[in-house]
């Protein structure tokens, strides 16, 4: 059976600045890599210089939209001044997105901060929210009328968990209390950022965040019925807490969904239990060990829609695999889940593959490859993977066979 998507459906791919641009020396991540002696992002994909080629690549795949982020540290190099040259650069990126007929979906914060911001205490200090809002104000005044879809924050829960609770990412804090503070300040930044965009952007800007959602299931082998209870607690805290707050304050126009995997949990001494990493559940895994399940994606889409009744945009979905066949299977299975959810009445407006390019996978370096295009990180050459042609056909004909 063939399924046709709505005629104004957005088909695209996503990237972020730090993971692709290269040489973002003035960010807290750059400093972190040096201090911890981690594999550095370095020149990444050289997207900062090759953006025209990359945007044209997205266009060549029959996509009609493109999600990318601005590097706050480039635009706002010191607390009280903006860098007009960098703003000109991003204007040129936007020109190229428009010239290729792609709808821009613009992310303002994707995990990285200016170094000066983190030296002032970063997201743990409530008085620092003001700096983020100055940056939002500048961006909105510069590009406002040209962008309809705004993602103020990418995955605040993932960011806080890794940076402030687990200490795996900058600023390397391990404290539930500090994590709570950071979360409160990020919410305030989101909320006031939302209001600023609504106030200044003409027309009807659509504002959201990209929310990482997982399908949490009770482990079938450990913890008995308590596993399902822990899974529900994780779901409420991890998937819904931030979204609930946004809805309460009426600051969400649609829901940006980043979905990757299913996770099994069982009870342990920690509040939200533990993830079961044993192979005794049978879903296939990707090179990061994430469990893939289109059925879980379908369930998450249905659940989030029935909870909030807001339109959904899939702002990230993708995988890193060992074979082209596995990429293709993931792609068709997950777009099939989007089609099934639409059939069940879920209002989904777009789908963005993560990512257009292989890129810098944070603390994991360059080993895990998510790209529609393979990137050779010494010559910076892009080569489309064969499965990208399957995605191209779906985008081009706006349909999929189920
Ligand atoms: C993040 C990306 C990341 C991807 C794959 C998402 O959670 O937004 O930055 O590369 O997952 O790990």
Image (cartoon, grey):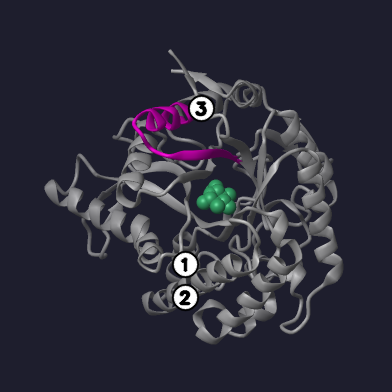
Residue for point 43% across, 75% down: 184
Q: Which of the two residues, 300 or 100, is positioned nearer the viewer here?
A: 100
Residue 307 in the image: above or below residue 283: below
Residue 251: x and y in percent read: 45, 64
Q: Which residues are magenta?
A: 334-354
Residue underneath mark 1: 160
Q: Position of residue 283 (x, y in %)?
A: 36, 31
Query: Could you give the CA–CA distance between mark 3 and mark 1, rounded to whole angstroms?
Result: 35 Å
Badge 1 element: helix
Q: Quadrant of residue 250?
A: bottom left
Q: Position of residue 348 (x, y in %)?
A: 46, 39
Q: Quadrant of the N terminus?
A: top left
Numbered tag placed on residue 182 in the rendering: 2
User: Taking the image as drawn, is residue 40 in sight?
Assistant: no
Which residue is rendered at x = 74% and y = 84% of the image? Answer: 80
Crowdedness near tag 1: few (<14), some (14–19) or many (≥20) residues, C-alpha within 10 Å: many
Which quarter of the figure is the C terminus placed in?
top left
> Sequence-wise, which precedes: disc 3 or disc 1?
3
Question: Which residue occupies 50% across, 84% down?
Answer: 126
**Contact (Cβ within 8 Å) of mark 3 with mark 1:** no
Q: Nearer the viewer, residue 135 or 49?
A: 135
Mark 2 is surrounded, within 10 Å at the Cα level, by few (under 14), some (14 to 19) or many (20 or more) other residues, namely: many
- Tag 2 or tag 1, which sits nearer the N-term? 1
Residue depicted at x 65% and y 37% = 371
Q: Secondary structure at mark 2?
A: helix
From the image, tell me which residue sits under label 3.
5
Return the mark for residue 124. Answer: none
Residue 153's place in the image compared with 343, above or below, is below
Mark 3 secondary-structure assignment: loop
- Give left or right: position of 46 versus 1: right
Is label 1 in contact with label 2 (beta carbons under 8 Å)?
Answer: yes
Q: Position of residue 168 (x, y in %)?
A: 51, 64
């Amino acid at each position: 059976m063939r399924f046709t998507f709505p005629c104004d459906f957005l088909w695209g791919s996503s990237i972020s600045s730090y993971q692709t641009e290269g040489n973002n020396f003035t960010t807290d991540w750059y400093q972190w890599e040096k201090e911890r002696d981690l594999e550095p992002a370095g020149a990444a994909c050289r997207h900062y210089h090759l953006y025209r080629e990359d945007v044209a690549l997205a266009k060549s795949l029959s996509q009609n939209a493109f999600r990318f982020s601005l590097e706050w540290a480039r635009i706002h190099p010191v607390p009280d001044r903006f860098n007009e040259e960098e703003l000109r650069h991003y204007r040129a990126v936007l020109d190229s997105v428009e010239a290729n007929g792609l709808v821009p979906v613009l992310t303002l914060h994707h995990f990285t901060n200016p170094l000066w911001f983190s030296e002032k205490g970063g997201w743990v200090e409530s008085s620092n929210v003001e700096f983020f809002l100055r940056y939002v104000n500048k961006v909105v005044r510069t590009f406002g009328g040209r962008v309809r879809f705004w993602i103020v924050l990418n995955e605040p829960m993932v960011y806080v968990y890794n940076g402030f609770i687990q200490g795996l990412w900058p600023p390397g804090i391990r404290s539930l209390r500090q994590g709570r503070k950071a979360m409160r300040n990020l919410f305030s930044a989101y909320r006031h950022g939302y209001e600023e965009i609504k106030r200044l952007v003409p027309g009807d800007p659509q504002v959201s965040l990209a929310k990482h959602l997982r399908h949490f299931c009770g482990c079938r082998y450990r913890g008995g019925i308590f596993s399902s209870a822990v899974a529900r607690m994780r779901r409420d805290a991890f998937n819904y807490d931030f979204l609930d707050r946004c809805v309460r304050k009426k600051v969400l126009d649609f829901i940006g969904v980043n979905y990757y995997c299913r996770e099994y949990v069982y009870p342990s001494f920690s509040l939200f239990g533990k993830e079961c990493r044993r192979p005794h559940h049978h879903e296939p895994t990707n090179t990061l060990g994430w469990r893939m399940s289109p059925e879980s994606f379908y369930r998450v889409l249905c659940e989030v829609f029935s909870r909030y009744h807001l339109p959904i945009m899939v702002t990230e979905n993708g995988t890193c695999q060992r074979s082209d066949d596995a990429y293709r299977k993931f792609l068709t299975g997950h777009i099939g889940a989007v089609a099934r959810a639409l059939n069940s009445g879920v209002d989904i407006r777009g789908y963005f593959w993560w990512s257009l390019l292989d890129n810098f996978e944070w603390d994991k370096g360059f080993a895990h490859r998510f790209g529609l295009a393979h990137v050779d990180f010494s010559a910076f050459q892009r080569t489309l993977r064969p499965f990208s042609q399957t995605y191209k056909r779906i985008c081009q004909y706006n349909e999929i066979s189920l």
